[in-house]
Image (cartoon, rainbow, N blue to C red):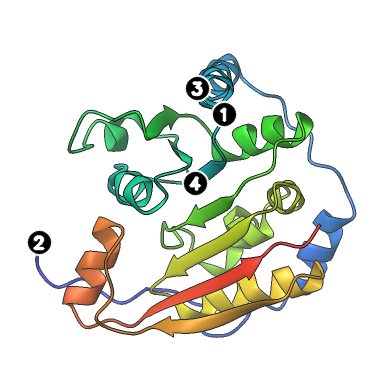
Amino acid sequence: GGASRQVSSNQSHLHPRLGRTVTRHLGSTYRAAIGDHNRAAYAQLRERLDACGRPLVLDSFCGTGHSTRALSARHGDCLLVGIDKSAARLAKHPAQPTDGYLLLRADCEAIWQQLAADGIALAHHYILYPNPWPKSRHLQRRVHGHPAFRTLLALGGRLELRSNWQVYVEEFGVAMSLAGQVGVVSELCAPVQPLTLFERKYHDSGHPLWVYRCAIAP
């Protein structure tokens, strides 16, 4: 509860190493070891996907899964899969998941890697967790600064990233542009339907919310 604080960061502009970092990662293939729990989670995803035969939508870093539930109503013809590495966050999900969506405790990058290896494309990809790495030294922990960025691109689909930190959204837009993708950064104007608890908090506190949208080209 209470008013939420603005992002606390020692970085007020695009990161000076953004271009170099993104370019390096785009030129290499991400091959991290995939742990057993990530393989088990992926097997669960594949089983559900193969059984239903619907287009796949990912809600990466879904936290409590509030957004996954909301998105499953928006994309009724798709299978919505929310992924978060925290069992504690997922345990706060407000309901029993329905047939329309699945919540997985796993590392997003490991699930992306396995989907890409199997050649599975996404219909939509949502990244709604506001950047948890606001310090300048944490560039490579942000989605666009991470070695798995190229893997994310391989999944395709209509991508939407949201945050209350404009620099983060603009960095993501620049990274996508470096990857040859054309998208748009814009402010999410009120009244906005909050998809996550973070968004509701920021919206209620009068913070602007920012969004990047792009249809990923092959």
Q: Which amino acid type corresponds to the residue marked 4 in the rendered image?
A: Ser
**Sequence-first tag of 1 and 4:** 1
Judging by the rendered image, the residue that carries numbered circle 3 is 48
The residue carrying mark 4 is 60
Tell me if mark 3 has few (under 14), some (14-19) or many (20+) residues whose alpha carbon lies within 10 angstroms of its own.
some
The reply to whether the C-beta atoms of the residues labelled 3 and 2 are less than 8 Å apart is no
Q: Is 117 placed left or right of 122 in the picture? A: right
- The picture quadrant where one finds residue 184 is bottom right
Residue displayed at 85% across by 43% down: 29
Name the residue at 81% across, 55% down: 25
| Label located before the other in sequence (4 or 2) | 2
Residue 24 point in image, percent of width and height: 85, 59
Q: Determine whether 35 is above or below 117 in the image.
A: above
Query: How far, Cα to Cα, is label 3 from label 4?
Result: 17 Å
Tags 1 and 2 touching, CB below 8 Å: no
Instruction: Specify which label sits upstream in the sequence, 1 or 2.
Output: 2
Check disc 1 and give the amino acid type.
Answer: Gly
Look at mark 1 in the image and give the residue it sits on. Answer: 53
Q: Nearer the viewer, mark 1 or mark 3?
A: 1
Q: Which residue is identified by label 2?
A: 1
Q: How far, Cα to Cα, is label 3 from label 2?
A: 36 Å
Mark 2: secondary structure = loop
State the separation of the CA atoms marked 1 and 4. 21 Å
Marks 4 and 2, how far apart at CA: 25 Å
Asked whether the viewer can see residue 165, the reply is: yes
Considering every residue shown, the one lying at the far right of the view is 27
